[in-house]
Amino acid sequence: MIELISADRCISCGLCVKVCPTNVFDGAVGEVPRIARQSDCQTCYMCEAYCPVDALYVAPYADKSVPVDEATLQATGLLGSWRATLGWGAGRTRLAAVDTTPFLDELEREIERSA
C-alpha cells in the first residue's frame, strides 16, 4: 500500500497521479500530490515505478497500512526501490537483461522453433 510521498524529493510532475489506476492521489502538476484514498491502493507499484526521482514508497502489504519513517527508508535504500529493481532510470540495468528465470529461455527456444 502507498505509504509515503517524499516532499523533499518530489518534483511535482504529477506522474504518480496520472498512472494510478485507482485514483489514490489528489494533486495537480506543480503540486506535491497527497495520498487521499490510501485504502484504494492496490499495491501495483505503478506510482513508485513511474516516479522519476524515487520519491514514493509502496509497502508490500496490500491490506494494511504500516508506519514508515522517511529517513529510515532512505538509509536502507527502500525509498524508490521498486523502480531501481525494475531498472527504470538512467544508469540502471533493466531487470529483463539480468533475469535468469528458466522458463524465459524455453519460451525463446519455442519461438525460434516455430519461426
Image: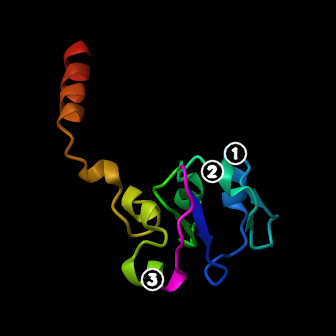
| Location of mark 1 (residue) | 22
Q: Disc 2 designates what residue?
A: 41
State which region is magenta: 63-71
Position of 17 relative to 33 (above/below): above
Main SS, magenta residues: loop
| Distance of label 3 from label 2 (alpha carbons) | 22 Å
Instruction: Please identify the quarter of the rendering in which residue 17 is found.
Output: bottom right
Tag 2: amino acid: Cys
> What residue do we see at 28% from left, 51% from top?
97
Q: Which type of secondary structure does the marked residue at label 1 adopt?
A: loop
Vertical arrangement, residue 111 with respect to residue 3, above or below: above
Magenta stretch holds residue 65: yes
Label 3 residue SS: helix
Q: Which mark is residue 72?
A: 3
Q: Earlier in the sequence, mark 2 or mark 1?
A: 1
Q: Residue at x 71, y 54 (%)?
A: 24
Q: Is residue 56 left or right of residue 61?
A: right
First along the sequence among labels 1 and 3: 1
Q: Position of residue 84 (x, y in %)?
A: 41, 65
Using the numbered discs, state the Cα–Cα distance from disc 2 to disc 1 in whole angstroms: 7 Å
Relative horizontal placement of residue 51, taking residue 12 as reference (left or right): left
Q: How many neighbours does mark 2 have within 10 angstroms: few (below 14), some (14-19), or many (20 or more)?
A: many
- Mark 3 or mark 2, which has the lower sequence index? 2
